Image (cartoon, rainbow, N blue to C red):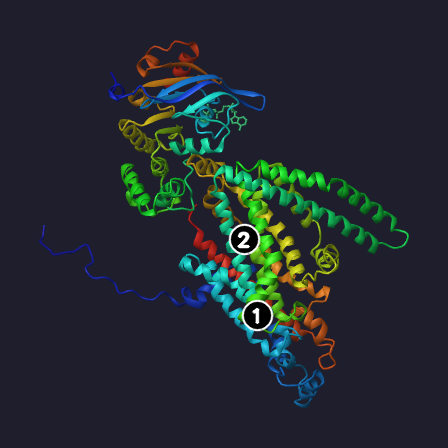
């Protein structure tokens, strides 16, 4: 054997060399994704053809767009003078910018108020939307926001929202106090509250019956009148006979529950906030305003419009219908037949009726149900209807999430001694809601777009503005693409944002590593 | 004699079940159950599938409601009164066949949740307790992971630690090892053996007969909703009295 110094292992590394051109970058991607076989290649070519045609057709319209003109005729003249066959008339957006955003009746010198409210919304929503990154104390900002925003947009005395906020906090304290009361004291309270709630309910039924008669008088043609009258008389007589027993029954039920606590606590808190809002709000706010006037010029609801109205309706209804939907979904699972029944009937009824019907009801009917002199705000009525409508859908989505949870989760929570509220809040809802995110977002996006339906009951949201004051004005008659395109962009931005946020949230919450 | 005999059993009574009956609809699941468990006892319950073993121990912490007879845990009578039920549940820990950890919480949060919300323990103290018990089941380094990232055996040990964090005086186990691969069974059984050595009162539904021999001071055999036979493990395995017990033992020890 010769003693040669042969090494079988290479000592130095081969320097890395770039992969061949057809295996990297754009070409590689295109080859893998667009031209992987002959069928895909044909599809790609056909698709490319249509895309190019579309861009070719639309580009001149965009590029020739006229941004500065006072009317659609002037716009066309400008295009004709320049010898251009086609071109958009974006001047309408410039000319009616304020109206598209705020509606045509909102006072111009107050535009800064909704704008500020919108900017504040971004800050107020952040602690709730990005709760894992923002310290909890910032949630106070979120809680205060509705009152600030209301004052900014509607104006009036600042003392009104402050008093309402104080009333809500005070109600919380009442709840706490009654909850921790000694049993004997609570039984006395239950007697008082029971009598008050019983009388209140009886009175409500009583005035309801009178309203029914009024409604019966105002609907139906001459011949058909008999049927609604008969129905409503039957209902009214029933109420007349039963309102006292009902009141006594309710009062007695509340009194009975004194020892246990739950119902008395709830009813006392509800009565407290009712008394504060119905009897104290007006005089106290007026008095405080007399001493220290903190007032912005008031803007009535019928002057709200434009995209601002869409955003108001969308934000308020989404943020109200999620909690209401959760309550309905939990109620539907309740073991108490009364609660379960109410929730089932509500959900099934509301889901079975088209939203547009509910909006007409809000517009016309709800006014009948109110005592004649009360002026029940139109936006509030619409908010109630849309919230009811979408909360029924959200409730069903969440019920799906609840049903998807294994029974073991409930049992584990029970076996650790967590009570119903704790188990629901800490174990059940976080998981059920996480499963339900795509469904909830689906409803929320749908709800936001459905707010445009209010244009049918003569409210001037962005679509209402376009259909009414803009398209019917002599200056901008028969303008379509530019304005509806603008509305579409407005809605797309928000809806796409919601969708992206929900996907991000789902990734944040992905802890199960299945 | 087995090691089990060396462990102390006190005269103090932990659980008294008297003449307890339970129905599912018209199906009579548990018939005339009488059982007294002293503090420090380690009881293994076995029996064929569907004999009502799970139902029996789930009645003890009111996961299932019984219709007749009485159950008294630590001197508290189990009735439909929610306060009593909550009190008993916080004194009695339970481990399930499928672990039932909370998948949206970390291991540490799983362990601190109940102490913080039910016992109102300060967070810091609850975390210290949790780390103590996680160290005891030998997985303190997993505290910040999520249940989905752990093996079955580790998850079951976390479930045990989670129960222990409530400082229960009694532990119930419902087939804690039957959803596990063989190599993970040992780590869970070792944890349970340690628990027994610390003097915990334990009721355990299991078919691990080695565990029964080593740890139990009493083995209970159930069939068709009744307690058919109960005895010390040596006697029970070597000298079964009823035919049904003999048949059952020959089946599970046969292979
Ligand atoms: N929720 C229920 N509704 C009706 N019957 C039930 C219910 N749960 C259990 N059962 C029945 O009660 C009987 C006892 O069930 P249990 O779960 O206690 O049996 P087990 O001894 O634990 O069986 P295994 O060894 O298979 O776990 C079974 O026949 C079962 O079919
Ligand atoms: Mg079982």
B149 vs A502, left or right, is left
Q: Nearer the viewer, residue A72 or B163?
A: B163
Q: Quadrant of residue B130?
A: top left
Q: Is residue B213 visible?
A: yes
Q: How busy is the neighbourhood of tag 1: few (under 14 within 10 Å), some, or many (20 plus)? A: few
Quarter of the image with the C terminus of chain A in it = top left
* Labels 2 and 1 positioned on one and the same chain: yes
Toward the viewer: A406 or B7?
Answer: B7
The disc label shown at residue A145, or none: none
> Picture coordinates of residue A225 (x, y %)?
87, 51
Asked if B168 appears above or below A6 in the picture, the reply is above
The subunit carrying tag 1 is A
At x 26%, y 22%, the residue is B7
- Label 1 sits on a secondary structure element that is helix
Quarter residue A230 falls in: top right
Give the class, few, some or many, for how many residues have Cα within 10 Å of label 2's Cα (few <14, many ≥20): some
Q: Residue furthest bottom?
A: A81
Frontmost residue, A509 versus A163:
A163
Q: Residue B209 placed where, x, y %? A: 34, 21
Q: Position of residue A319 (x, y in %)?
A: 56, 57
Give the left or right position of residue B48, taking residue A209 as reference.
left
| Most distant residue in the right direction | A223
Tell me: A120 left or right of A381: left
Q: Which x, y percent locates residue A390?
A: 62, 54
* A415 shown above or below A39: above
Q: CA distance from mark 2 to mark 1?
A: 50 Å
- The answer for which chain carries disc 2 is A
Residue A290: give its label: 1
Residue A260 drawn above or below residue A401: above
Q: Residue A438's mark?
A: 2
């Amino acid at each position: 054997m010769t003693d040669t110094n042969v090494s079988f292992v290479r000592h130095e590394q081969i320097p890395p060399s770039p992969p061949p051109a057809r295996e990297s970058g754009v070409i590689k991607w295109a080859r893998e994704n667009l031209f992987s076989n002959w069928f895909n290649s044909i599809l790609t070519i056909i698709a490319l053809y249509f895309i190019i045609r579309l861009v070719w057709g639309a580009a001149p319209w965009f590029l020739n767009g006229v941004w500065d003109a006072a009317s659609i005729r002037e716009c066309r003249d400008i295009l004709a003078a320049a010898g251009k066959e086609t071109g958009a008339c974006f001047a309408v957006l410039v000319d009616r910018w304020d109206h598209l955003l705020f509606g045509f009746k909102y006072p111009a010198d107050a535009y800064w108020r909704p704008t500020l409210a919108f900017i504040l919304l971004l800050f107020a929503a952040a602690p709730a939307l990005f709760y894992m990154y923002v310290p909890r104390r910032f949630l106070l900002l979120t809680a205060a926001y509705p009152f600030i925003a209301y004052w900014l947009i509607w104006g009036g005395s600042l003392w009104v929202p402050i008093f309402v906020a104080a009333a809500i906090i005070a109600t919380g304290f009442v709840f706490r106090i009654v909850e921790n009361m000694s049993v004997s004291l609570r039984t006395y309270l239950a007697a008082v509250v029971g009598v008050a709630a019983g009388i209140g309910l009886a009175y409500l039924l009583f005035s309801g019956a009178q309203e029914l008669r009024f409604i019966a008088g105002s609907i139906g043609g001459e011949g058909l009148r008999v049927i609604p009258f008969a129905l409503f008389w039957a209902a009214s007589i029933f109420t007349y006979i039963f309102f006292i027993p009902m009141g006594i029954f309710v009062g007695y039920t509340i009194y009975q529950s004194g020892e246990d606590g739950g119902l008395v606590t709830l009813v006392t808190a509800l009565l407290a906030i009712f008394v504060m809002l119905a009897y104290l709000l007006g005089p106290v706010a007026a008095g405080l305003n007399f001493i220290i006037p903190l007032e912005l010029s008031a803007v009535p609801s019928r002057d709200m419009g434009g995209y601002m109205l869409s955003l108001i309706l969308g934000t308020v209804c989404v943020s109200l219908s999620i909690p209401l939907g959760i309550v309905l979904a939990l109620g539907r699972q309740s073991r108490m037949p009364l609660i379960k029944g109410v929730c089932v009937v509500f959900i099934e009824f509301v889901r079975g009726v088209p939203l547009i019907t509910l909006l007409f009801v809000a517009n016309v009917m709800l006014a009948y149900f109110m005592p004649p002199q009360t002026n029940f705000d139109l936006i509030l009525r619409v908010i109630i209807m849309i919230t009811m409508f979408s909360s029924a859908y959200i409730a069903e989505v969440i019920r799906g999430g609840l049903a998807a949870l294994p029974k073991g989760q409930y049992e584990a929570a029970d076996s650790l001694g967590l009570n119903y509220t704790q188990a629901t809040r800490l174990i059940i809802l976080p998981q059920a809601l996480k499963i339900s995110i795509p469904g909830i977002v689906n409803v929320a996006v749908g709800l936001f777009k459905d707010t445009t339906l209010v244009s049918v009951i003569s409210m001037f949201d962005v679509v209402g503005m376009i259909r009414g004051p803009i398209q019917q004005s002599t200056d901008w008659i028969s303008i379509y693409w530019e304005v509806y395109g603008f509305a579409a962009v407005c809605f797309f931005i928000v809806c796409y944002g919601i969708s992206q946020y929900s996907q991000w949230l789902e990734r944040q919450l992905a802890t199960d590593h299945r | 004699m087995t090691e089990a005999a060396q462990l102390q059993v006190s005269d103090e009574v932990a659980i008294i079940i008297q003449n307890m009956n339970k129905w599912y609809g018209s199906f009579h699941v548990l018939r005339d159950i009488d059982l007294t468990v002293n503090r420090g006892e380690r009881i293994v319950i076995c029996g064929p599938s569907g004999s009502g073993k799970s139902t029996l121990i789930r009645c003890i912490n009111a996961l299932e409601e019984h219709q007749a007879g009485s159950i008294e845990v630590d001197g508290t009578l189990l009735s439909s009164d929610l306060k009593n039920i909550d009190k008993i549940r916080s004194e009695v820990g339970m481990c399930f066949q499928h672990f039932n950890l909370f998948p949206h919480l970390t291991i540490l949060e799983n362990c601190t949740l109940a102490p913080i919300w039910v016992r109102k323990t300060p967070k810091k103290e609850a975390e210290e307790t949790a780390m103590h018990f996680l160290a005891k089941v030998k997985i303190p380094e997993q505290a910040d992971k999520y249940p989905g990232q752990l093996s079955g055996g580790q998850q079951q040990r976390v479930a045990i630690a989670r129960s222990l964090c409530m400082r229960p005086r009694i532990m119930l186990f419902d087939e804690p090892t039957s959803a596990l691969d063989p190599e993970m069974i040992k780590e869970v059984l070792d944890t349970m053996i340690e628990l027994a050595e610390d003097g915990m009162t334990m009721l355990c539904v299991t078919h691990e007969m080695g565990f029964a021999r080593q740890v139990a001071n009493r083995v209970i055999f159930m069939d068709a909703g009744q307690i058919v036979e109960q005895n010390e493990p040596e006697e029970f395995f070597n000298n079964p009295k009823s035919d049904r017990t003999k048949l059952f033992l020959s089946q599970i020890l046969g292979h």
